[in-house]
Image (spheres, coloured by chain):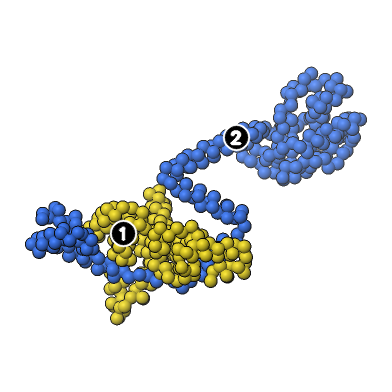
């Protein structure tokens, strides 16, 4: 367990963190380690889909769990722990995305350029896919790359909403809570995002 | 139901979040309208493609990375944490679009101010490096004249009574000498005579006193002057003469 391991280095800090977890215990019946086990893939996958880059996703995921570790004591239980974690992950990923966008606007570098140099995620995904043969794996990889590329072309807020709905399978209410927006805005963002994707897929096919 | 009304609701219909009555109307419309049916199929296709991007599992070492981050943060002193917090907050501020221009403008102003202050803070020794240097043929008693002018400037009373032929002598003209060459070593000089060496770094010092002056202060003053003076490579007609140095001291004017 994290606090026990930390106790080897810094008793006072570890005790205070353990206290925080215990205080949060009435609302979260999980230790930090259990939270990590349960939600690490969810967080990593969501962040990866939003940013489209494995290294960036790793970096942001670390930030997310570090934030969870620090803020777990102040979690008030107004929403489910899952939605709370989603909210942190979306917030962090969106911030990183905006940071890239600013760099692009200044002409320094674009996220697409960065991603074109880091296509490791596609390979990783294709290896994990259920393809029967190398040819199938390649086709699936190409298909995924195309879908990811089109996802990345969506405006950030629409992208996040579409990913949470169609890939993560969250309900409209959960998305509204995680993104801290109204239900109507969620519906509109998802509808617009899907519309753009549909148009882009058609153009690509034609 | 008209297409204009049905099309915006297709996404919600697909997710099954419409109220039952509207859902029935959309369903009936889709049964009749080929265009809307095609749009609905398109939505379905988008959904299938996105669903095919199943979750990417987090790498096993993410656990170690998070643990390392937490341990590091726990071990850091309050100073490190404070510095990181400030850096994080500052990075948030400066990455704001409006603030970016403000910080850049501030940086430019500060840099300009810095250069203005630096240049005004230093009192420059004015010396045009490219200015041609006269190739002087020193008269035999020229070094004597140097000493006379110097002592006059230094306020040595006995020498002030001497007749000084040269007015406004520029001492920088007099130190156009080769390395190691004696600047003032004329035996006829009845005041003092020294051998001064200048190395390539420009530092000068009296190497040998050939003849001591009657007033010891004169020698000390001369030594102080020559060791604190600045030297630069000599130049002639715009060409640097690396074998020679020129003493960079202010012009010394001599009164009668």
Dot 1: element: helix
Task: Tell which of B167 and A133 is nearer to you.
Answer: A133
User: Residue B56 lies in what quarter of the image?
Assistant: bottom left
**Percent x, y of residue B221:** 83, 32
Q: Name the residue: 72% across, 32% down.
A: B249
- Crowd class of label 2 (few under 14; some 14 to 19; many from 20; radius 10 Å): few
Separation of marks 1 and 2 at Cα, in angstroms: 61 Å
Disc ID at residue B126: none
Q: Nearer the viewer, mark 1 or mark 2?
A: 1
Q: Which residue is mark 2?
A: B117
Task: Tell which of A36 and A45 is nearer to you.
Answer: A36
Q: Is residue A52 above or below residue B5?
A: below
**Percent x, y of residue B226:** 78, 36
**Percent x, y of residue A178:** 37, 58
Horizontally, residue B128 falls left or right of residue A165, namely right
Q: Name the residue: 19% across, 55% down.
A: B8
Q: Is label 1 on the same chain as label 2?
A: no
Counting labels gives: 2
Horizontally, residue A140 falls left or right of residue A37, namely left
User: Residue A64 lies in what quarter of the image?
Assistant: bottom left
- Crowd class of label 1 (few under 14; some 14 to 19; many from 20; radius 10 Å): some
Please state the chain letter of the residue tagged with numbered disc 1 in the rendered image.
Answer: A
Dot 2: element: helix
Q: Is residue B116 above or below residue A185?
A: above
Colour in which chain B is drawn: blue
Q: Name the residue: 76% across, 37% down.
A: B228
User: Residue B25 lies in what quarter of the image?
Assistant: bottom left
Q: Which residue is mark 1?
A: A173
Q: Residue furthest left?
A: B32
Chain identifier matching the yellow colour in the rendered picture: A
């Amino acid at each position: 367990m994290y606090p026990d391991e930390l106790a080897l280095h810094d008793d006072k800090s570890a005790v205070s963190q353990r206290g925080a977890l215990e205080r949060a215990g009435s609302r979260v019946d999980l230790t930090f380690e259990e939270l990590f086990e349960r939600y690490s893939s969810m967080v990593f996958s969501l962040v990866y889909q939003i940013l489209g880059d494995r290294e960036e996703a790793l970096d942001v995921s670390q930030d997310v769990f570090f934030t969870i570790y620090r803020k777990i004591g102040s979690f008030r239980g107004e929403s489910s722990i899952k939605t709370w974690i989603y909210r942190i992950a979306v917030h962090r990923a969106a911030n990183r995305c905006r940071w890239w966008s600013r760099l692009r606007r200044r002409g320094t570098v674009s996220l697409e350029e960065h991603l074109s140099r880091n296509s490791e995620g596609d390979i990783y995904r294709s290896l994990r896919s259920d393809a029967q043969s190398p040819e199938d794996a390649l086709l699936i990889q190409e298909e995924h790359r195309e879908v990811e590329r089109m996802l990345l072309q969506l405006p950030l807020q629409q992208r996040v909403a579409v990913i949470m709905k169609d890939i993560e399978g969250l309900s409209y209410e959960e998305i509204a809570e995680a993104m801290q927006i109204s239900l109507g805005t969620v519906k509109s963002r998802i509808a617009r995002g899907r519309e753009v994707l549909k148009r882009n897929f058609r153009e690509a096919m034609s | 139901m008209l297409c204009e009304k049905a099309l915006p609701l297709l996404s919600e219909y697909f997710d099954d979040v419409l109220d039952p009555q509207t859902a029935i109307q959309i369903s009936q419309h889709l049964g009749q309208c080929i265009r809307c049916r095609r749009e609905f199929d398109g939505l379905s296709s988008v959904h299938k493609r996105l669903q095919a991007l199943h979750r990417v599992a987090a790498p096993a070492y993410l656990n170690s990375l998070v643990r390392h981050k937490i341990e590091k943060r726990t071990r850091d002193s309050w100073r490190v944490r404070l510095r990181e917090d400030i850096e994080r907050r500052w990075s948030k501020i400066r990455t704001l679009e409006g603030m970016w221009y403000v910080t850049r403008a501030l940086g430019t102003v500060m840099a300009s101010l810095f250069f203005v202050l630096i240049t005004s803070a230093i009192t420059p020794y004015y010396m045009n490096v490219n200015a041609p240097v006269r190739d002087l043929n020193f008269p035999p008693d020229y070094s004597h004249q140097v000493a006379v002018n110097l002592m006059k400037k230094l306020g040595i009373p006995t020498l002030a009574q001497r007749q000084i032929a040269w007015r406004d002598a520029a001492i920088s003209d007099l130190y156009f000498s080769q390395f190691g060459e004696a600047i003032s070593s004329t035996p006829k000089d009845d005041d003092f005579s020294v051998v001064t060496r200048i190395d390539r770094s420009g530092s000068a010092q009296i190497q040998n006193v050939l003849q001591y002056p009657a007033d010891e202060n004169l020698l000390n003053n001369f030594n102080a002057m020559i060791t604190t003076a600045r030297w630069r490579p000599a130049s002639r007609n715009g060409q640097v003469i690396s074998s020679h140095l020129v003493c960079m001291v202010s012009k010394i004017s001599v009164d009668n």
